[in-house]
Image: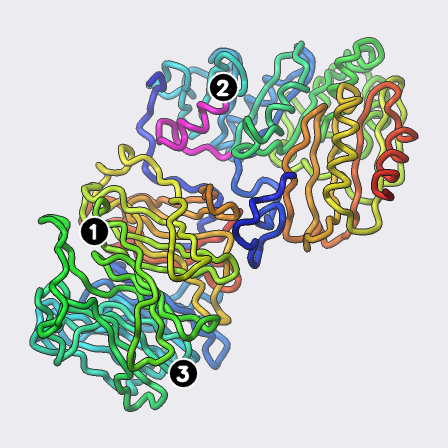
Amino acid sequence: MDNARADAPPASIWNFRLLAQHALNGFGGMGEGLSIQIAPDGRRILWAAHESAPKNFTGIDVTDPRNPRVVVQTELPQRFMRSNSLELVGNTLVVAYQVQQPGQAPAGFEMFDVSKPEEPRSISFFDASGPKSRGVHQLWFADGEFVHMAAGAADFTPRNQLDDQCYRIVDVRNPSKPVEAGRWWLPGTQEGDAEPAPERHVAGNDFGFRAHNTNVYPQRPDRCYLGYLDAGMFIMDISDKSQPKVISRWDNSPPYVGFTHTVLPLFGRDLLVVTDESVVDGGADWPKLVWIVDARDERNPVPIATCPMPPLRDFQGRGGRFGAHNLHENVPSPNCWQSEQVIIGTFFNGGLRAFDIADPYQPREVAHFVPEAPRNSPVGAIQLNDVFVDERGIVYTVDRFAGGLYVLEMDF
Amino acid sequence: MDTLPLVFPAGPGGGPFGRRLRRAAAGRVPVILVTGFLGAGKTTLVKALLESEAGRGTAVVVNEFGAVGLDQALLAPAATGKVALLSNGCLCCVLRSDLETTLRNLHADRLRGAVPDFARVVLETSGADDPMPVLQSLLNDRSLAREYHLQSIITVLDATTAVAALTSVPEALRQLAIADRVVVSKADLAPPETVQALLGAVHDIALGVPIEVASQGRVPPDFLLAESSLPPPSALVAEAVHTPGLSSFTLPFDRPLPWRRIATGLGLLQDLRGADLLRVKGLLAIEGCTGPVVVQAVGQVLHRPLELEDWPNGTVAPRLVFITRGALTRAKVEPLLHGILAL
């Protein structure tokens, strides 16, 4: 290399404009749940799940994106709980509760009426605790009728504790009395299954055969696009919610190392965008990528490209994780930006990155934002965890540990 | 031609030329080309930009580190090798074997983290250089056009000598003819009537092009950093200029056109008279597109078309601006294009 390198700060921004940053009153460790509400009084409220206790969720008035203001910040009842995920439809907020150890309670999800954002009112609680359950890690709630989630259950006994969260569907059409509508798990992972247990990933890469994102869209209400960690991704037929059926599976591991997280369908493009989450610090599980998958025939998804990543060498030593995680998921909400040309994702210390996939065989990075390490970050680096873009094109992204909320505009 | 593979539908937000863009530079690094004769004041202009707050994050390509006359204090201590980082976040890159290689390496270095992010590239041509090959490299999709966007050609004119040069040196005339913006330098050293004569000449040759008279070598940074790759406002479309040896004219089009016909027409002009086709830039309504399509051509290179989300300022005004040389006049070009469109 013949270039001189100065001590450039890790912060960099290209084709995004930073409008504001808010440390959320010192509780800036955020999970992977972001949703926008237009409150009855006209205010635009961003609801954000916290990554861990003591805070449950925070409501932020982002009507003026340059001046975000916290309007409410709630507490979890137990220190061993984490909310991590939430979704909102209308004025109904659904919040996931996961616990640290199987058997702990409460674990499940809680529904809130947030018509008055300053005063969230509990509507109901769905219990997903059990001897082998850690509750709900992630949930999807978009149609106002069903919650799709990665969850354990009192009557779900995994053969391996790492496989404790399956795909569950809960009917919340009567929000005061949620009832389970159906569930599916990878055959062979529950005690009593006729199928043999799946071959586990090698030690160090064995993260579990369990559900993560459970996306369902109005374009195909009979399909669930399911990330199932070490089992790869599934397209599920949920036309009969009581009996979800596998249509197809694509699993890149081995040789990759699992943790398939998000499956984002682009219905107008016959494509899927799939992420594998980085879960090990220092880039030790590199490469964790964003995959572009040909979905012209849903029975046979074919990977055709990956989004270009910045160099491992430049990020692995910065602290914390480096690699793919969450995407902006085109949530079917009038308050959500929709894009089938640009994919925006978070990459932990790799920041926020946007890719033009107009030619899906050649994704191109068109923007990025890598903030400086937040004050008090335990890993000494930014760890951008989740992203949501509202219908105005305002981008909200959150740090996993300390940085709180970053509000940006796109300029590409 | 120029359209994406049809394996997958374009989907919402996309068209035959890919993603509809908010702006012409979207997702690419803008390049500002500063041209002008030796001693015209290009270096002073670039130096002032680098030292301004608005100029932060600029990568300037130079022949040698000393070329831009930067204060040593501005150079970061680690400034060695081919790239020097400046203390204000700018960087200087020494021209390697050729411009294309230099810009490719700069892009690659940026991707792999070898140099910090930069927001734009400023390219100062040497006074004797013909800027046409540089423009062709920037517009050629097989070389640099995927990563770089030609944002602006800024021609610097020395008020004390430019009038004479424009009448006696063909390269000076050509540099002015292709300009998107003009900076007049050293106006304080020239008699007022000379400056006025120059401004008049600039207006005649470079129709509708914004002009800024430098004060002590400086102009407002916004003038230098403005997006200028699109044609000037539609109010000027009916005018035409004929300077000896040069023609500048605008062809308006009142309906959506089939891209294949336009590409064929421009291709024919390029094949037969590319050397005289100095520059074409425009916005067209193209069949199958919902937004305006940006057209740029230099000599024998036609840039890959780009579709924008909206017409600038909401004004629908499809048009192509031609800057041509010799006998390639409007009288030749217009009937050819309309003939092909009518076939």
Disc 1 residue type (three-letter): Val
Q: Position of residue B251 (x, y in %)?
A: 84, 39
Q: Which mark is residue A115?
A: 3
Relative depth, front residue between A412 and B19: B19
Q: Are marks 2 and 3 on the same chain?
A: no
**Magenta residue check for B110:** yes
Which label's residue is closer to the chain start, 3 or 1? 3
Disc 2 residue type (three-letter): Thr
Q: Magenta residues, as a range? A: B102-119
Reading the image, the residue beneath label 2 is: B101
Q: Which mark is residue A279?
A: 1
Left-right relation of A47 to A409: left
Q: Position of residue A232 (x, y in %)?
A: 26, 57
Q: Residue furthest right?
A: B331
Left-right relation of A327 to A296: left
Rendering quarter of residue B212: top right
**Magenta residue check for A127:** no
**Badge 1 element:** loop
Colouring mode (rainbow / by chain / secondary structure / one colour): rainbow
Disc 3 residue type (three-letter): Ser
Q: Position of residue A247 (x, y in %)?
A: 34, 66
**Badge 2 element:** helix
Query: Can you say whether A40 is above or below A97 in the image?
Result: below
Crowd class of label 3 (few under 14; some 14 to 19; many from 20; radius 10 Å): some
Residue at (20% x, 67% y) in the render: A186
Find the distance from the CA under tag 3 to the CA under tag 1.
36 Å
Q: Tag 1, which chain?
A: A
